Image (spheres, rainbow, N blue to C red):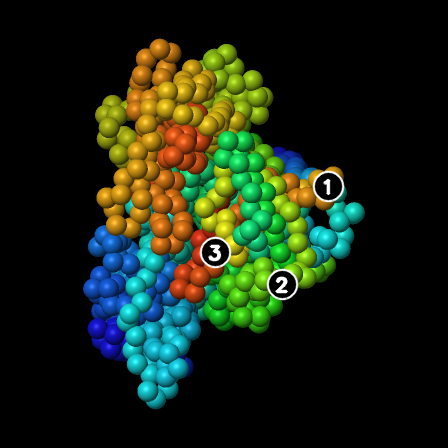
Amino acid sequence: MQKKSHLKIILGVLVIVGALVYLLYSATRSNTQYFMTVRELRDRQEQLSDQKLRLSGAVIGESIHYDPLTLDLSFEVADIPGDHRLIEQMGGMAKVLADAVADPNAARLTIRYHGVKPDLLKNEAQAIVTGKLDANGDFQAAELLLKCPSRYESALPEQAGD
Amino acid sequence: MFYLGLACFGLAFLLFTAAFFGTIRNLLRKNHVIPRHVRFLSNLSFGFHTLSILALLWLQVSQDYSNAYVVSVINPPMPTYLKMTALWGGMAGSLFFWSWIINFCLVLGLNRRHILQNNWALLLAQLNLIFFSAISLLIENPFKRVWELGDGSLTESLFSPETGARIYSGMTGFGLNPLLRHWGMVIHPPVLYIGFGAFLLPFAETLSRLILNQDHDDLVAQLRPWLLVAWIFLTGGIVLGSWWSYDVLGWGGYWAWDPVETASLLPWLVSTGLLHSLFLQQKRQIFKRVNLILILLTYLLILFSILMTRAGLLSSVHAFGASAITQPLLVFLAALSLLCGALLAWRWKCLKSGWEFRSFFSRDALFLYTLVLLSAVTLVCLWGLLYPLATRSVSGTQITLDRAFFDGAAAPLFVLLVLLMAVCPLVGWSLNSLKKLSKRAWLPVLTAFFGTAAALIWLTRSWTALLTIFIVLLGLAVLVAQTWLELKAAPRPLRAFWRRRARHGAWLVHAGILLIALGIVGVEALSQSIQGTLVPGDKMPLGRYAVELTAIDEDFENPEYLSVRARLNLWRGDKIIAQINPGQDLYESRSQYVSIPGKRSALTGDFYTLLLDYDPAMGYAVIQATLNPLVNFMWIGAFLLCLGAALSLSAPIAPEPPDAPTEPENDAL
């Protein structure tokens, strides 16, 4: 009896482990998003259609267009590095964002979003967007996250989702 | 006050370092009893540590803007209680506060018997205290002052950075981030920290026993109260955070699988598994090795969670941003993990215990499955957290897994867990035949069936939601039925309940979790949402309800922010049942707004509205309305959970004679 029930217990555990492996595999396959910089995305634009992407960039203030009645929002972001350490070396996030906006040669990308314009969306803010590239090469964002770095505060972003 | 605070902190640091060396000396002399002078030094260091906390609080409340930390978290209009709780509102302060909590737990353990009673355990606890205090003192010191240099630029340091520099106090701060000004957030960090800190003691005690190769048989009796207290605080902390995000963050979410949230869930999952497997050791003298591993793992995961919050490894809503403490923390975590692994390997053979199970469908086997499932969820969380870091270091591109990954991978496992929990009270400790089971189960199954049928008619057509509702109702019915049967049989029901409060407490915890599951089903599967632009007089329907905008009010009373409220009438049918006022508080100085949701709460659910946008000139408001059925069961469930655990904690565990006949109903957790 002991032996037999042990076998069954091991079977029970194996079933759970099997379920875990399957869930990890299937959920990973269908839910990966590539975290990219604007430049990387521009370089590999053709391969990335239909792929879920996550992107970080510096908001260019004068490009923000918003219609409060239809809730259509669009703005451009400029390329910033994706690596924390590199950003620290370049003088911190605030400086990197300001430089990126001022640099006319930085890679840029248009972001489109449907929803209310977050107040933190302004010049030199850091936008983190999740979504896909559309046929025009614009970025259709499903989720929009903003951070405003300042010297004396750990920045808390504001979240807007769909 | 600066000098007092810094001096007390320094003195406390010296004192517990002295105590640390005292402990080492005792260990070298092979003296196992903790001598009185070490105890005295520790208590004294805690006194000074507390004084320096008070000094920092004084700096905050008196708004001493020469202190850099005060500048970063305080501004004049903040109410006094927020000025005090800003202690844990920023990086430096919260780290300092955390070191104080560790000292508090250490002193508590040292002065109460049953734990931390040998020099090795004390040494390990002291090591943690010294580490966190050192990074607080040397890297993120909250007493740093703002200095104006000769060229007019500002810098922060403890003492004058160059000759001719002057202390500068002309900068008033932005104050605590408005999102954190909520009483859920005011108490969430300390509750979580106490939970974290309380796990240090079992960790140190267990490691010390491994070093000394002591017997682990009484480990359960010794550690159970500490683990339960820690678990209650940990649970409370997580729930408070979740409630805060539902109430404040302005998107109506209670859980977002944000890296920091997920990381704080890891120790909870493992310690929940631990509470179950400890019970198996107590009951059946099995699973000793598993228990040791889980105790050690819980604390290591707590450190990992702190690392996730502080190190800025992943972009997160909560993270404090990149910091200089990342590397020391990483090294410390790696060293402790290695130590644990090495000690376990060294003592592995001595820790042998059986793992006989009576049947694959007995209660002890269900405990095992629970443990495996909890570990599986833990692995899912770890996978989701580490995948982006791993892909970044391997391929250079960071690939993140989003919410849908966690929902997709963890939700089925959670449903299975809830199912086990639902049937567990029906299953006896020993052999079970299906016949016996069906005899006990038919009434609860019938109840759950009718309940689910009702949900199908009135609530939802989604089969996953219906399945979960069925399991939850089954579990609740089983718990109620079992409790009823047992109390009915006893001559004095209340006394019987109290006498067996350990078990009834555990059942209450399970009932709490079932209710939380019900709340989650409500929000995830049954909620409806609508968004629209309204002018006064407009009505927007949602389900059986409708909201009507009557006015948009602006209030300039508060010096810090402009308060905007949309006045809404909530209609059900052709009656106004409530007036709700969602709004925004606009902080001009920091160009940030905080959404204030307008809610009508009832047991059946929340009608949750947000003012997304408005224009006073054109007179329109953009309103989002969400119907969240059953959501309040989440908070009720969480309350029952903590209540049940506390009830269980109040019961002493009676040591069972080893050859006692194990009755199917004789259990106590």
Counting from the top left corner in percent of width and height, residue B655 is at 35, 47
CA–CA distance between discs 3 and 2? Answer: 19 Å
Amino acid at the residue labelled 1:
Asn
Mark 2 lies on residue? A103
Q: Chain of mark 3?
A: A
Mark 3 lies on residue? A148
Q: Quadrant of the N terminus of chain B?
A: bottom left
CA–CA distance between discs 1 and 2? Answer: 24 Å
Same subunit, labels 1 and 3: the answer reads: yes
Mark 1 lies on residue? A136
Task: Tell me if mark 2 has few (under 14), some (14-19) or many (20+) residues whose alpha carbon lies within 10 angstroms of its own.
Answer: few
- Kindly indicate whether the residue at mark 3 contacts the one at mark 1 (C-beta within 8 angstroms): no
Seen at 71% across and 52% down, the residue is: A41
Looking at the image, is mark 3 or mark 2 nearer the viewer?
2
Same subunit, labels 1 and 2: the answer reads: yes
Task: Tell me if mark 1 has few (under 14), some (14-19) or many (20+) residues whose alpha carbon lies within 10 angstroms of its own.
Answer: few
